[in-house]
Image (tube, rainbow, N blue to C red):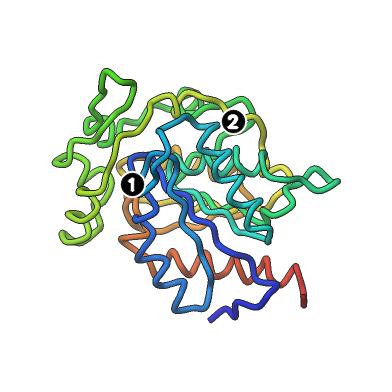
């Protein structure tokens, strides 16, 4: 168990497209059991947020504002689309004289997109070998520029290793996602100065494992889990293990407070 001493960072969890902070509940319970403090953020327009839906830069600025308001070291975790959000958010947080984020000590990409400077999610996918995934068939475009997911097809795409009860609860909470978030590029590559961990999910049917492995080469460390696109729900203990190791490493580097 990791002791949440003052030198221990706070884990900040950023959800992916169509989701909300609700998706992290099982993982947060496991982190609580280990004494690891965490905060899950609702991106604008998702979960219980009353803000309007926005774009990638707006989502990232929202996360950056939360981090700066917290004013303490954080391990920043992003799932799926949330990987692009944490990449841009780390660029937008307050910076130290070295140019590194003042508060972000480690980035964790959970079956996530890890774009480089001037790269969008769709732009990154365009540079990789073509692999179809079940998520594509589940997406339904709307006239307002957002997309929603067909629940019958989204279950297999997102939650293939989860229990029926978890799947039903998650599908009922999914919300529209602005498609602008998929084509807007990030403005920097914080992994150049901040350590990072990529968690590859080998049974993923939303972000193809081959694509994940390519993006994992952009990170400092790579971990593999044999599960679906939602390891926070299908393998919360194993996911908590990964985060616990990262938190312990960051705390050790910080030393006694």
| 93 relative to 36 in the view: left or right | right
Residue under label 1, please give it. Answer: 204
Q: Quadrant of residue 163?
A: bottom left
| Residue depicted at 50% across the width and 37% down the height | 59
User: Foreground mark, 1 or 2?
Assistant: 2
Residue under label 2, please give it. Answer: 186
Q: In which quarter of the image is residue 153?
A: top left
**Which one is earlier in the sequence, the residue at label 1 or at label 2?**
2
Where is residue 243? Give x, y as percent: 52, 65
In the displayed structure, would residue 178 be above or below residue 231? above
| Residue depicted at 68% across the width and 44% down the height | 93
| Residue depicted at 40% across the width and 65% down the height | 27
> Helix or strand or loop: what does disc 2 sit on?
loop
> Helix or strand or loop: what does disc 1 sit on?
loop
* Distance between mark 1 and mark 2 Cα atoms: 24 Å
Where is residue 124? Give x, y as percent: 51, 28
What label does residue 67 carry, if any? none
* Circle 2 crowding by C-alpha within 10 Å: few under 14, some 14–19, many from 20: many
Total labels: the figure holds 2
* Circle 1 crowding by C-alpha within 10 Å: few under 14, some 14–19, many from 20: many
In the displayed structure, would residue 102 be above or below residue 56? below
Where is residue 227? Give x, y as percent: 33, 56
Where is residue 9? Give x, y as percent: 63, 66
| 250 relative to 62 in the view: left or right | right
| Residue depicted at 46% across the width and 71% down the height | 31
């Amino acid at each position: 168990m990791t002791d949440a001493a003052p030198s221990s960072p706070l884990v900040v969890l950023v959800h992916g497209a169509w989701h909300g902070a609700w998706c992290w509940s099982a993982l947060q319970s496991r982190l609580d059991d280990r004494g690891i403090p965490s905060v899950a953020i609702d991106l604008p327009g998702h979960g219980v947020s009353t803000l309007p839906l926005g774009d990638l830069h707006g989502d990232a600025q929202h996360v950056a504002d939360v981090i700066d308001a917290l004013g303490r070291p954080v391990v920043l975790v992003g799932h799926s689309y949330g990987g692009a959000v944490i990449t841009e958010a780390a660029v937008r947080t307050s910076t130290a004289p070295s140019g590194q984020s003042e508060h972000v000590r480690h980035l964790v990409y959970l079956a996530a997109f890890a774009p480089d400077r001037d790269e969008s999610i769709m732009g990154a996918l365009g540079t990789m070998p073509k692999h179809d995934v079940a998520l594509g068939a589940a997406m339904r475009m709307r006239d307002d520029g957002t997309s929603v997911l067909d629940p019958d097809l989204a279950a297999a795409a997102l939650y293939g290793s989860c229990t029926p009860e978890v799947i039903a609860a998650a599908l009922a909470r999914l919300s529209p996602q602005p498609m602008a978030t998929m084509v807007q590029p990030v403005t920097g590559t914080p992994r150049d100065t901040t350590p990072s961990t990529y968690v590859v999910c080998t049974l993923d049917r939303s972000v193809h494992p081959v694509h994940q492995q390519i993006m994992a080469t952009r990170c400092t460390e790579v971990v593999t889990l044999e599960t679906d696109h939602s390891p926070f729900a299908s393998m919360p203990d194993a996911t908590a293990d990964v985060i616990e190791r990262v938190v312990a490493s960051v705390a050790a580097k910080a030393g006694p407070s």
